[in-house]
Amino acid sequence: MTHFPRWSAVVLAVLFAACSGAAPAPTSITTTTAPTTTTASAPSTSTSTSITTSTSITTTTGGDPAVELLTMLVVTDVEPSLDYDRGDWGSGWSDADSDCQDTRQEVLIEESVSPTILEGGGCRVDIGSWYGAFTDTWFDDPGDLDIDHFVPLANAHRSGGWAWDRDTKRAYANDLEDPGHLIAVSSSANRSKGARGPEDWTPNHTGYLCTYATTWIRIKVRWSLTVTPAEHDALSELLAGCDGSVTFDTTPPAPTSTTVPPPSTTVASDTPADPGNSMNCSDFATYAEAKAWFDTYFPDYGDVALLDNDDDGEPCESLPGGP
């Protein structure tokens, strides 16, 4: 796979939209801060399995674009109709382009500010240089990093994702189209965050709070997710301290494929397949879920996903129900 710097994805999206004669994406929201007018097209129907209405909006008012996007979100505290099941969102990182580099490796490669050194036949990142925005620190060992679902899976579930089919859930869990959807952060920060929203957790790096709030809002708009009243208030409070100089590309994800892969032949074994470093504490809603996953793989592979930060046999202790 050819890798562009992740910060350039938004710029490329805007340039391609402006310069090509291709039909527009199902949903495209672009904001600027030049004070003129606001135009909006009527809703249209999308072919996506998860997003059935789309809107094309160009906002050129003098207001804060993030605040305007926040007003587009549905505010509700209605509980989901189904319980959260991490397995519905995939058993781990996928390798959508079959290049042997799963989603975690793709993010590490694209976010490294220096050329990465690969091992394992070019399938795994061994050395690079990464900026951890949550903590304002630099890393050169990928083992110190988790790949954070910016809006955690459990949060997406209770924000409307519970109604998606499994293909859409797995597309969300491995979304590489949006450069802010998955980011490399320190393992400790990711585990501190867990599945909590901005009403309960924000990064220690105060200089990142505006980006944190605007990225959270943009992802929720892109995936048509809701916010709770407390979450909305927290985001509004964070935005109050921002200057509004943010550019958005909220083009929604492409429809997920419904192609069924051919069945594969496997040999039964009592030993589970090595999941690799494929899970973060934020992928679990409770300590009990994290512990069950940890206990499944620990006897054969140890703490392969680095969930047990203090090596006491208790993973993700900050999650609800932890010891």
Image (cartoon, rainbow, N blue to C red):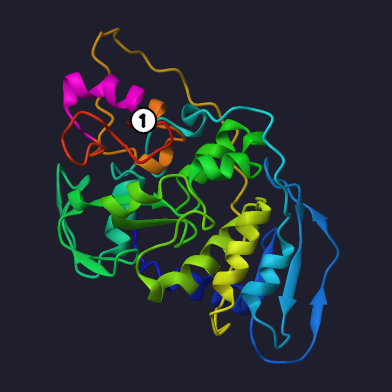
The magenta stretch spans residue 27: no
Q: Residue furthest right?
A: 42
Q: How many marks?
A: 1
Where residue 113 sits: x, y (%)? 24, 70
Residue 292 included in the magenta stretch of the image: yes
Residue 129 seen from this side: no
Q: In the drawing, does residue 38 fall left or right of residue 32?
A: right
**Image position of 26 (left or right of 207):** right
Residue segment shown in magenta: 291-304
How far across and down, in percent of the image, does residue 317 sit?
Answer: 32, 37
Front-lying residue, 287 or 213: 287
Within 10 Å of disc 1 (Cα), the crowding (few <14, some 14-19, many 20+) is: many
* In the rendered image, the vertical position of residue 186 relative to residue 98, given as above or below: below
Q: Which residue is mark 1?
A: 290
x and y percent of residue 83 in the render?
A: 59, 27
Residue shown at 60% from the left, 33% from the top? 258
